[in-house]
Image (tube, rainbow, N blue to C red):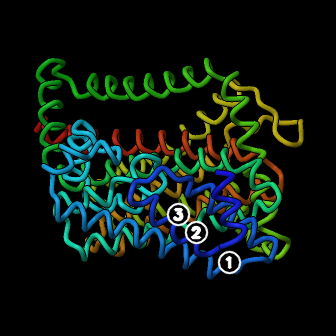
Amino acid sequence: MNLIIDLFNHYGYLVLLISLTLELIAFPLPGEALMTYCGYIVYTNKMNWTVSILVAASGAITGITISYLIGKILGVGFFEKYGHFVHLDKKRIEKISIWFQSYGSKLLIIAYFIPGVRHVTGYFSGITNISYRKFSVYAYSGALVWTFTFISLGKVLGANWEKYHSLMTRYLVIAGLITAAIIIIIYFYRNYKQKILEWLISTLQNSIRIFNSLGKIKILFAGIAATFLVFSVLVIGIIQDYLANEFGQFDEVIKYLVTHIFDESWMYFMRIFNSLSNNYALLVVILLTMLWISIKGSNKLYEIRFLIISYLGAEGLGILLKNVFHRLGPSGIIYTFPSNEVLISIVIYGFMVYLIIKQSKKTWIKTIITVAYFILCFFVGLSFVYFNIQYPSDIAAGFEFGMVWLSLSIILLEIYRILPKLRN
């Protein structure tokens, strides 16, 4: 790394271009560290931010395009025989081939953030005969996002780039894996929705035959959901000491970034987003959701009932978690782990969004509403960090537990919606 930095200090853009080209061909070079260092040089005004991103993206695009063409021309047989020279042995080829065939090219965007994966995605795109048009859309977009992220990160970190780089890289890898998991879940849902529904109906029919009572079945599934939730809380409680150390590092890095990215000019917007999580705003959302259900709902009684249960359950879950963890917030007066405001916002806004997209038939409308929902929740959480009311780890935990409770609520709603039809 020191040698590359020395070369970078003398030849700047040229080293950035060549290094990222070689890394995406599968040479073991520290591309992320180099881009973060480049961001630091931008911070010192010795390089241009826009030009650096364009040069870095060009290098990544060149490298992944070369690997794509090599994979397309040489095919599977060649790499099974000689692939170990570029970290592509037969076992890895088989695993990643299944990964590509199952989840498609959309994960090319996320793959850049996962070490060991970005180096071979170009080859596998060619080996699996993904069309160049599809490959270029996702691979080139990913290259731009990847280079923008790390160069901008280095610029924001400034003189602390070396101190925080490894931690931020680690958190970005985790975020990339979580995003990839979400994409995989969405992929499975879209492509195997009918099979999942058939399996669910079969399971429910078997349950009806065994218990011969809808009431008992409802209690059974509610018990399973509650057991899963309690188990999750207990597991995190058991590893609390380890998490406390992780949270300290995470909070330090994120608070540093927030204070350097969002200055006083953001205060008005942060106040707006912060207000969207108070009880009055959430009450309005609940009333609007009830109005939507009364007009568009396919099963009004169940949907209103589960909306109320979701809200009350989120409140109760927040209280339970605070008493499990006993973690004081920045004020040192009240418990803030996890963020109750974020947890409830995730659930209430999410339940409303779910009902809306369930009725919508146009994919682009569903996409816009879903993206808007996550942006809203992100800035709601960010506002609490901005005003130093809660720690970043409080917000992250609020997101996690909120999504778990929202998912369980929606799953139970759909199960309870199906049961009477099966009984009849």
Q: Name the residue under label 3.
A: 19
Which residue is painted at 18% across and 37% down in the image? Answer: 200
Q: How crowded is mark 1: few (under 14 residues within 10 Å), some or many (20 or more)?
A: some
As drawn, 218 above or below 175: above
Nearer to us of marks 3 and 1 is 3
Question: Label 3 sits on what residue type?
Answer: Ser
As drawn, 262 above or below 233: below
On the image, the x and y values in percent for residue 23 come to 46, 58
Residues marked 2 and 3 touching at CB (< 8 Å): yes
On the image, the x and y values in percent for residue 91 come to 24, 36
Which residue is painted at 68% across and 59% down in the image? Answer: 5
Q: Name the residue under label 2.
A: 16
Write down the quadrant of residue 272 in the picture.
bottom right
> Residue 210 or 408: which is nearer the viewer?
408
Nearer to us of marks 2 and 1 is 2
Provide the secondary structure element on which disc 3 rests.
helix
Which residue is painted at 24% across and 49% down in the image? Answer: 188
Q: Mark 1 points at which residue?
A: 49
Question: Label 1 sits on what residue type?
Answer: Trp
> Residue 146 or 199: which is nearer the viewer?
146
As drawn, 51 above or below 334: below
Write down the quadrant of residue 9 in the picture.
bottom right
Q: How crowded is mark 2: few (under 14 residues within 10 Å), some or many (20 or more)?
A: many
Which residue is painted at 29% across and 44% down in the image? Answer: 88
Q: Earlier in the sequence, mark 3 or mark 1?
A: 3
What's the CA distance linking mark 2 and mark 3? 5 Å
Q: Earlier in the sequence, mark 2 or mark 1?
A: 2
Question: Label 2 sits on what residue type?
Answer: Leu
